[in-house]
Image (tube, helix red, strand yellow):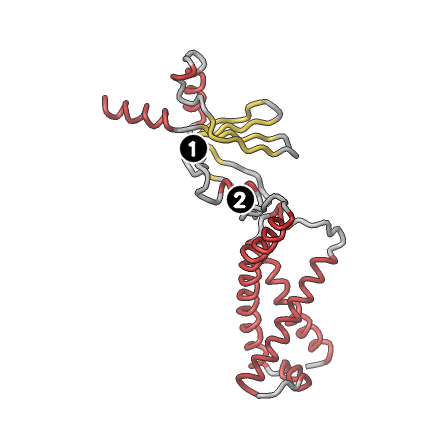
């Protein structure tokens, strides 16, 4: 194996953990939180290099603890010419990347907000929420009634785009903004009928909350479902 091929293989082994960790991080972290002012990519490149170095030296420590019982870096790097060690390191880097990324995510999700909130409390500042985006807090938890089956109205700049039963929506880490609604025609018929009824008799006269995207001008209204469920139950009973 010539020097050029050795260099390419070692570069691949070195970059692999950081690149794989970046992919995992994008899955863990909401897009709005993950975006940073990094037009030239230097921050992401630095993260990949630092993470790869951590995994590389973790491999050195693991090799010393379980096999060679020494921290000789020259023999460690020479071991990469062995096919057996090459495959073993790929497996190790794969597992270590997953573990380190998961631990970092847990640390960033629980420990960092705790420390920041203790400091904010000491300074008399507002406390940070557990979730990194309002979208994640609404759609990915049971704190609000934003589960499937809730009637929502999607509006932009004061104009109604669609109404229907919420069926599917993208996770916070997805770059897309699609929302799937069902039975839109039936829901529109309910709203048309509500126009001729007094406020207390409307099926969808009350909204529990409204999600506002101030940057793009979108508003998602979540309607209270109590009267609708009572109406459906009455139809089933009478039927």
Which element type, helix, strand or loop, lies under badge 1?
Answer: loop
The outermost residue toward the right is: 40
Residue at image coords 46%, 37%: 146
Decide: few, some or many residues near mark 2? Use Cα within 10 Å; few <14, some 14-19, many ≥20. some
Residue 142 horizontal/vertical position (percent): 44, 43
Question: Is any atom of residue 102 visible in this view?
Answer: yes
- Residue 145 occupies which quadrant of the picture? top left
Residue 120 shows which numbered tag? none
Side of 239 relative to 110 (left or right): left
Residue at image coords 63%, 45%: 125
Q: Which residue corresponds to mark 2?
A: 136
Residue 10 lies, with reference to residue 207, above or below; the image says below
Residue 150 shows which numbered tag? 1
The outermost residue toward the bottom is: 69
Residue 10 lies, with reference to residue 150, above or below; the image says below
Residue 160 lies, with reference to residue 144, above or below; the image says above
Question: Is any atom of residue 24 visible in this view?
Answer: no
Residue 208 horizontal/vertical position (percent): 46, 30
> Quadrant of the image for the C terminus?
top left
> Quadrant of the image for the N terminus?
bottom right
Residue 97 horizontal/vertical position (percent): 57, 66
């Amino acid at each position: 194996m010539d020097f050029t091929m050795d260099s390419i293989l070692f570069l691949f082994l070195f970059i692999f953990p950081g690149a794989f960790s970046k992919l995992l991080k994008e899955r863990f972290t909401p897009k709005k939180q993950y975006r940073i002012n990094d037009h030239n990519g230097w921050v992401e490149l630095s993260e990949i290099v630092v993470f790869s170095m951590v995994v590389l030296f973790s491999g050195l420590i693991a090799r010393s603890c379980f096999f060679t019982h020494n921290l000789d870096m020259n023999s460690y790097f020479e071991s990469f010419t062995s096919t057996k060690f090459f495959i073993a390191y790929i497996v190790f880097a794969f597992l270590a990347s997953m573990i380190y990324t998961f631990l970092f995510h847990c640390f960033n999700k629980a420990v960092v907000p705790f420390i920041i909130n203790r400091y904010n409390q000491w300074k008399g500042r507002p406390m940070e929420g557990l979730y990194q985006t309002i979208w994640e807090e609404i759609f990915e938890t049971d704190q609000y009634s934003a589960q499937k089956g809730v009637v929502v109205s999607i509006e932009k700049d004061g104009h109604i785009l669609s109404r229907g039963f919420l069926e599917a929506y993208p996770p916070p880490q997805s770059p897309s903004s699609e929302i799937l609604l069902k039975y839109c025609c039936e829901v529109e018929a309910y709203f048309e009928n509500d126009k001729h009824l007094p406020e207390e008799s409307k099926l969808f006269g009350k909204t529990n909350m409204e999600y506002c995207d101030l940057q793009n001008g979108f508003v998602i209204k979540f309607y209270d479902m109590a009267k609708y469920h009572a109406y459906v139950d009455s139809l089933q009973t009478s039927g």
